[in-house]
Image (tube, rainbow, N blue to C red):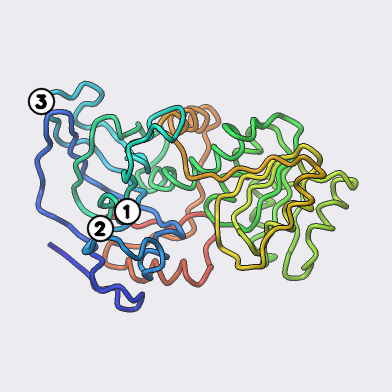
Amino acid sequence: MKTFELTKFGLENLVLAERDRPRPDAQEVLIKFHAASLNFRDLMFAKGIYNPHAKLPAIPFSDGAGEVVELGSAVTRWQVGDRVCPIFNQGWLEGDPSAARPKSTLGGGDLDGVLREYGVFHEQGLVSIPEHLSYEDAATLPCAGVAAWHALVTFGRLKAGESVLTLGTGGVSIFALQFAKAHGARVIATSSSDEKLARARTLGADEVINYKNTPDWEKEVLRLTGGVGVDHVVEVGGAGTLQKSASSTRVFGRIAVIGVLASGSGLNPVGLVMKSIRMQGIFVGSRQMFEEMNRAITVNHLQPVVSKSFSFEEVPDALRYMEASSHFGKIVVRY
């Protein structure tokens, strides 16, 4: 078994593993992984911040893609050779998340993650990979892609002609930009980098704001929308940006709260009340959402944006790359 000790991130018992090939039970499927992608949650876990009471050693990373190499005796959904991704919450297949099995999320201390050569999963906990995507492309989808889809389509019920505000240029925000444009929406994108904003324009962003140069970016959002505000905000900052996001939102607009990247003093609820803003926390999504998103990706021939790819042995470097916030889109590990 190949392992690394990520002492740089304060967690010596985090195992990056190529384990011996396991055998699936009756309704289980054996997956040979070929790629994984990083989320901010993975960096927090590696640093001991996310779920500090997790049972260790643990295999990290929730988002992976691979091929079916062996079937349990009762499996009916899959065939050997099928290309699949495990869903993030193995217990949330559809409907209300309260019905999901408890402690069924991957790579954060509940269940082992995907940073390994082989993994066994229940046949219900997998989705097919769109045909035009590589394993590296597909590995970007389970958290960032599904969260963005949940935010804009499932919760947001996005319509053509509506406006969307995205914060930063990480995985969720770039997927939100791509999904919004596929739905015919107008997108205002923010970043602290003019270079990244230029890249956002190539993906279809209609307006861009450098929040480093324009710290009162919510006022610029209002100016760009004629004083009305946007219909949707994909909020990945948390306490540090939520107040500005609320100020940027129109009456009866929607804020989908996904991330906790920016620290701050919190939100004054008066604006939410006065504008009747609907706000919802987004904890990734169900298998049903994943499958709906994949159909849209296939129809639109959408291509996930991969910032940089690392080998299995370079996982610590991949985590440092994420820590430096140098990426645009997703960071991938190939193996």
The reply to whether the C-beta atoms of the residues labelled 3 and 1 are less than 8 Å apart is no
The reply to whether the C-beta atoms of the residues labelled 2 and 1 are less than 8 Å apart is yes
In front of the other: 213 or 100: 100
* Labels 2 and 1: the sequence-earlier one: 2
The relative height of residue 76 versus residue 195 in the rendered view (above or below) is above
Image coords of residue 219 (percent x, y): 84, 58
Tell me what residue is drawn at x 78 percent, y 61 percent: 217
Residue, disc 2: 59
Which SS class for mark 2? loop
Say which amino acid is labelled 3.
Ser
Say which amino acid is labelled 1.
Gly
- Horizontal side of 260 relative to 53 (left or right) equals right
Residue, disc 1: 107
Tell me what residue is drawn at x 83 percent, y 57 percent: 220
Image coords of residue 46 (percent x, y): 35, 67
- Horizontal side of 237 relative to 119 (left or right) equals right
